[in-house]
Image (spheres, rainbow, N blue to C red):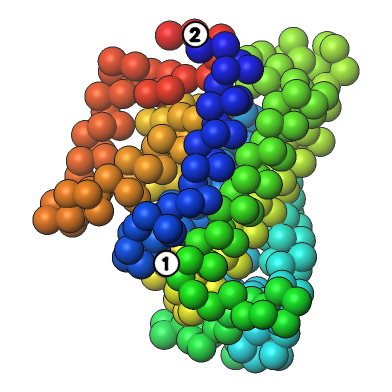
């Protein structure tokens, strides 16, 4: 399928998605909303892993930062939800850039282990009620709903439309990133860092920016997640969540927008179809990851032009 055909198909699918609440019950609308939220987080992970080629196994940290920033500002300081979004994005992005400074010096397994350590530190900090704001192990409850022009977005359908529109905006950003000079620099670095430096690419600058952008988008998804569940707790951002995001990108296809969304659907939507077996989703997804690595190392839906 050509790039234009894939793009047109994607646009058509997104438009059709706007009508889902009219055809599904509230339970399935909630599943679709979770898919949209995790689709954004997985795409943000793909910037770091799939495009920059850095093994980030602590991505749930940035997701959690966004969720906690919104929860704290809304519940403790009574800020409107939409006003918290820029701060959730900026703080997550700043934290990503800050962590990138030591992390980008590491490669492969060392980067993997270091990012796992940061994830563990984040969860422990939240469990210990950091600065008396995070609520400890119980987290923060009673998060409000966003309001648009004075109208509360409180129904499940309205929340889904909000999540779906934000996903659409992120998809446009991802497409623009792929065609930008920065996107090309990421591809050069992933393919051959030494060769990339000879044509003027600054690896440290590009990798740090990749971490910041990926973390910022994850922070945005964290806000949507906090509002969707009306609560946040450390258990939602444990190491297993980072592993899940990592696996989604690997199984779906690194650097492939359709592949990442397919991986997200397999992880969060398919188990709801086979609900009796949903508790085994990590086991099944683990086997799927092994099979993909052996039989289709570029993922189920690889990026166009990727080598098998």
Position of residue 243 measured from the top left corner of the image (x, y, whole percent): 40, 47
Q: Is residue 239 above or below residue 2?
A: below
| Residue beneath disc 2 | 307
Marks 2 and 1: in contact by CB < 8 Å? no
Mark sitting on residue 236 = 1
Residue for point 64% across, 59% down: 220
Residue for point 49% across, 79% down: 230
Position of residue 13 measured from the top left corner of the image (x, y, whole percent): 50, 36
139 and 8: which is toward the camera: 8
* Left or right, residue 243 beside residue 291: right
Position of residue 114 measured from the top left corner of the image (x, y, whole percent): 53, 48
Q: Secondary structure at mark 2?
A: loop
* Left or right, residue 212 beside residue 304: right
Residue for point 31% across, 23% down: 292
Mark sitting on residue 210 = none
122 and 258: which is toward the camera: 258
- Few, some or many C-alpha atoms within 10 Å of disc 1 (few <14, some 14-19, many ≥20)? some
Outermost residue, right side: 200
Q: Is residue 168 above or below residue 94?
A: above
Q: CA distance from mark 1 to mark 2?
A: 35 Å
Q: Earlier in the sequence, mark 1 or mark 2?
A: 1
Outermost residue, left side: 276
Is residue 275 visible to us here?
A: yes
- Few, some or many C-alpha atoms within 10 Å of disc 2 (few <14, some 14-19, many ≥20)? few
Position of residue 110 measured from the top left corner of the image (x, y, whole percent): 52, 38
Q: Secondary structure at mark 1?
A: helix
Instruction: Give the quadrant of residue 21.
Output: bottom left
Residue for point 66% across, 14% down: 192
């Amino acid at each position: 399928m050509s790039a234009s055909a894939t793009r047109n198909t994607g646009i058509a699918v997104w438009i059709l998605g706007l009508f889902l609440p009219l055809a599904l019950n509230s339970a399935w609308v909630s599943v679709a909303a979770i898919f949209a939220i995790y689709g954004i987080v997985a795409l943000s992970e793909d910037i770091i892993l799939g495009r920059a080629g850095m093994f980030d196994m602590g991505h749930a940290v940035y997701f959690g930062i966004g969720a906690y920033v919104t929860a704290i500002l809304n519940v403790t300081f009574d800020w409107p939800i939409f006003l918290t979004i820029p701060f959730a994005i900026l703080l997550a992005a700043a934290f990503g850039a800050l962590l990138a400074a030591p992390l980008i010096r590491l490669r492969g397994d060392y980067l993997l282990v270091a990012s796992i350590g940061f994830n563990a530190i984040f969860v422990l900090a939240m469990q210990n009620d950091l600065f008396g704001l995070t609520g400890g192990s119980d987290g923060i409850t009673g998060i409000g709903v966003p309001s648009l022009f004075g109208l509360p977005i409180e129904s499940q359908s309205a929340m889904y439309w909000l999540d779906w529109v934000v996903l659409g905006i992120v998809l446009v950003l991802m497409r623009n990133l792929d065609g930008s000079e920065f996107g090309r620099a990421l591809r050069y670095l992933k393919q051959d860092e030494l060769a990339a430096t000879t044509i003027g690419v600054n690896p440290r600058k590009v990798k740090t920016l990749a971490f910041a952008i990926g973390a910022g988008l994850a922070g945005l998804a964290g806000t949507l997640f906090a509002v969707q569940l009306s609560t946040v707790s450390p258990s939602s951002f444990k190491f297993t969540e980072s592993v899940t995001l990592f696996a989604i990108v690997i199984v779906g296809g690194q650097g492939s927008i359709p592949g990442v969304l397919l991986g997200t659907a397999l992880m969060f939507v398919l188990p709801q179809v086979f609900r009796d077996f949903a508790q085994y989703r990590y086991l099944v997804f683990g086997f799927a990851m092994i099979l993909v690595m052996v039989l289709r190392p570029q993922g189920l839906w690889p990026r166009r032009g990727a080598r098998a």
